[in-house]
Structures are given as structure tokens and as C-alpha cells.
Image: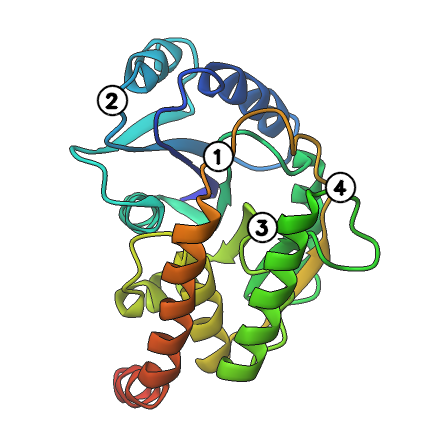
Amino acid sequence: MLKYSIVIPAYNEERVIGNTIDKTVEFFRKQKGTFEIIIANDGSKDQTSKIVLAKIKKYKELRLYSNEVNQGRGAVLSNAFKTSKGEILVYIDADLAIDINLFPKLINAIEEKKVDIAIGSKHLKESEVEYPKIRRLFSKAYFLCARLLLGTSVKDYQCGFKAFKREALLKILPYVHSKGWTWDTETIVKSIWAGYKVAELPAKVVNVYGRESKVNLLKDVKTMGKGLLRLRKEKKEFLRNFYSKT
């Protein structure tokens, strides 16, 4: 079995995906342990797949997973992780907005501190980030709502850099229903409810303004708010089903 599987979700990322692949392969070749990089293409309509296929000829560690049609970031992450071969499963956003040097700290938390899931956070005291004011207000409000409704204390569910023990993630995925942006919250919250240990580590944002955000605040705030309410309703059923099968 490989040591690491790195999944990079991509939807119409032709402007950045080639450079992201080059940087990611270069970085992980310097780390200890075998790895694969899976570009999880969510039905892109641009040249994303073509660029990835060209890079596969150059990098033996690279492969492509594709949804035929766009289903959502959460859907393509779940599908791609189910095809992974690594002991530790990682995902990184396609624009590399979070400094990739966070990776060894996430792995240390899993291997040395024995947590099941290690996630980057833009909202800890030691985090290095400048965000537009409206995004900061949205993130804080979302954290407070999640804490109130779901009883968890994670400060940043949506940071695009997370690492999971294989067993933990694959046991939770059958219970994750979100196909969109709420995937991160649902995965982390249900992992905590299931008794898995989660560590949150300060992240450094290196590319906040480098491209247009794919988050539609008005639309996605509404969707994610509904997602929090759905999760609250699902808690008892989830716990009953999860523990009946473990």
C-alpha cells in the first residue's frame, strides 16, 4: 500500500492545474514515503482533463479520476477517495491557496500525536491570512452557528488542506450525503460524533487573491445553512446507524 494519497478536486481549473501538478509532485518527491496524486475532475468543460492526461505521461505518480458530469466538490472528493490506495488520505485545493508546507505538520499530528484527522485552519491565533472582510465575517458566523447547532468546536471546517487516516475517512464516507461545499463540515462533524480525534493546525494562506473565488456567498451561505440544520436533525440516526455497524 502507498503511504499517501493526495486528492486535488478540480472543476474548470485549466488556468492553474498544470502548475499545481508540477509543484505538488516536486514537493511530495522530497517527502518520505510513496504517494499518488489523484486529480479529481468534476466534469470540467474546459481543458482540465487534457492538461492532466498530458502530465500523466510525465509523472508516474499522477492519475485522473473524472465524474462525467459536474456533481459538486463533495461528490468528486468522496468518489476519488474511494479509489485511493494510500494509508493516509489528503486533499489539497487546486489553487494551492494554503501553503503546502503545512503537510508535515498534519502528518506529525496523525503519526506522533495519534489523531485520526488533521486539518488546516485559517482561524487560529497562529494562522497567517488576509481575507476580505465579508469572507471573515461569513467564516466566523458559520463557525458560531456550527458550534451552536452541532456541538463541535472546530473553527475552520472549510480550509482546503486536510489529512485523514484511511480507516477513519472510509468508515465515515458512507454517511456523508453532501455533494457540495458542506462536505467538509459533514465529514468532520460526523467524524467527531463517531469518536475520532481531530486536530486543527494553523495554516498560512499564500494565494487568497490569485484568482476569482468559486464560492457564491449568497447562494452558498443559504445552502450551507440548510446543511447545518440537516446535520443537526441527522445526529441521532447517524450515531445509531454508525455504532450498529462497528
Of the two numbered discs 4 and 3 on the same chain, state the one appearing first in sequence: 4
Query: Which residue is under mark 4?
Result: 130
Q: Quadrant of residue 51?
A: top left
The span from disc 2 to disc 4 (Cα, nearest Å) is 31 Å
Q: Amino acid at mark 3?
A: Cys
Q: Amino acid at mark 1?
A: Phe
Of the two numbered discs 3 and 1 on the same chain, state the one appearing first in sequence: 1
Query: Which residue is under mark 2?
Result: 45
Q: Viewer-proximal residue, 221 or 93?
A: 221
Q: Are marks 2 and 4 in contact (CB under 8 Å)?
A: no
Q: Residue at x 23, y 44 (%)?
A: 71
| Quarter that holds the N terminus | top left
Q: Residues within 10 Å of mark 2 (few under 14, many from 20)?
A: some
The span from disc 4 to disc 3 (Cα, nearest Å) is 14 Å
- Is residue 107 depicted above or below 154 in this figure? above
Return the x and y of residue 60 as percentages of the image width and height. 40, 19
179 relative position to 181: left or right: left
Q: Amino acid at mark 4?
A: Glu
| Quarter that holds the C terminus | bottom left
Query: Which residue is under mark 3?
Result: 159
Q: Residue at x 61, y 58 (%)?
A: 139
The span from disc 2 to disc 3 (Cα, nearest Å) is 25 Å
Return the x and y of residue 34 as percentages of the image width and height. 51, 34
The numbered mark at residue 35 is 1
Residue 224 visible in the picture: yes
